[in-house]
Amino acid sequence: MLRLILLGPPGAGKGTQAARICQKYSIPHISTGDIFRKQIKEGTEFGKKAKEYMNRGELVPDDLVLEIAEARLTEEDCKHGFLLDGFPRTVNQAEQLDKFLNEKDLSIDKVLDIRVDKEELMTRLIGRRVCRNCGATYHVINMPSEKEGICDVCGGELYQRSDDTAATVENRIGVYNGLTVPLIEYYEKAGKVAHIDGSTGLDKVFGDIVIAIGDRE
Ligand code: AMP
């Protein structure tokens, strides 16, 4: 049983690390951003509302986010733990999440706080490309696909997320510093935070995460 939260500014590598963590510990990866992008693609009412906020790099309002997140956490596969990626993002969301879990006699085990400086984040995000089909991520300079615009894994088309443009990225980092960084203090008071240097390379970051989680096997 392992309930984790992955914190870190946009571009810190949360998606990449989340996939590895979930594979190693056999827990579902719950990314509110992924859920929202799926809803946008499907053209749902929620997707239409969320899209406006997302394209501006702003947060989707808490009541909408909480409804979606709690519905997801109630699904069967979350019974034995989960990794939250991109949720909670405000102190209010964290308080509501704690309330939701407490009512079920559950709690968060560990909060992983991945840190990367702003200049590096800007470079990473603006060059990021994502496969429309399988979600694999690339970087135009640091990790290009073999054939430009085509996914190495599945042959799908690579695209730039509409919120990975310079102005939106700047805004998303500002929003993270203003609204999400206070969460670190919230969870520090509960003694749950492990700080991870996110600039050291994928394998080292993952190794540090595994050490922070501790012996769970
Ligand atoms: P992400 O994929 O985690 O970078 O999320 C992309 C965008 O979705 C964010 O910039 C927000 O607009 C929105 N979003 C995702 N998760 C949340 C959340 N927990 N609270 C508010 N907005 C969110």
Image: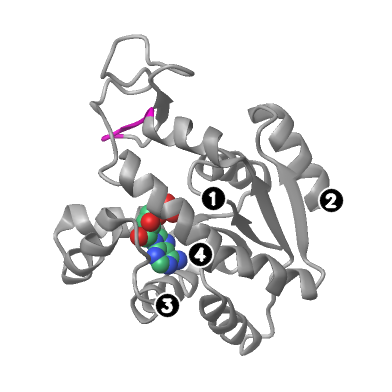
Find the distance from the CA under tag 2 to the CA under tag 4: 22 Å
Residue linked to disc 4: 87
Q: Is residue 201 magenta?
A: no
Task: Answer yes or no: disc 4 within 8 Å of ligand 1.
Answer: yes
Residue 186 vs residue 213: left or right?
left
Residue 137 placement (x, y as % from top left): 41, 31
Crowding at label 1, few (<14), some or many (≥20) Cα neighbours within 10 Å?
A: many
- Residue 199 located left or right of residue 97: right
Residue type, mark 4 in image: Phe
Q: Who is closer to the viewer here, 18 or 205?
A: 205
Q: Quadrant of the N terminus?
A: bottom right
Question: According to the image, label 3 marks what residue?
Answer: 66
On screen, residue 90 above or below 77:
below
Placement of 102 over or under 48, stated as above or below: below
Locate residue 157: give its quadrant. top left
N-term mark: 2 or 1: 1
Quarter of the image where ligand 1 sits: bottom left
Q: Is residue 128 magenta?
A: yes
Residue of label 2: 214
First in sequence: mark 4 or mark 1?
A: 1
Query: Type of residue at label 2?
Result: Gly
| 2 vs 3, front mark | 3
Q: Mark 3 or mark 4: name the one nearer the start of the chain.
A: 3
Task: Pick whichever of labels 2 and 4 is earlier in the sequence.
Answer: 4
Q: Name the amino acid, label 1.
A: Pro
Q: Residue at x 21, y 57 (%)?
A: 40
Task: Please state which of residues 155 and 31 is positioned toward the viewer in this rendering.
Answer: 31
- Marks 4/1: CA distance? 12 Å
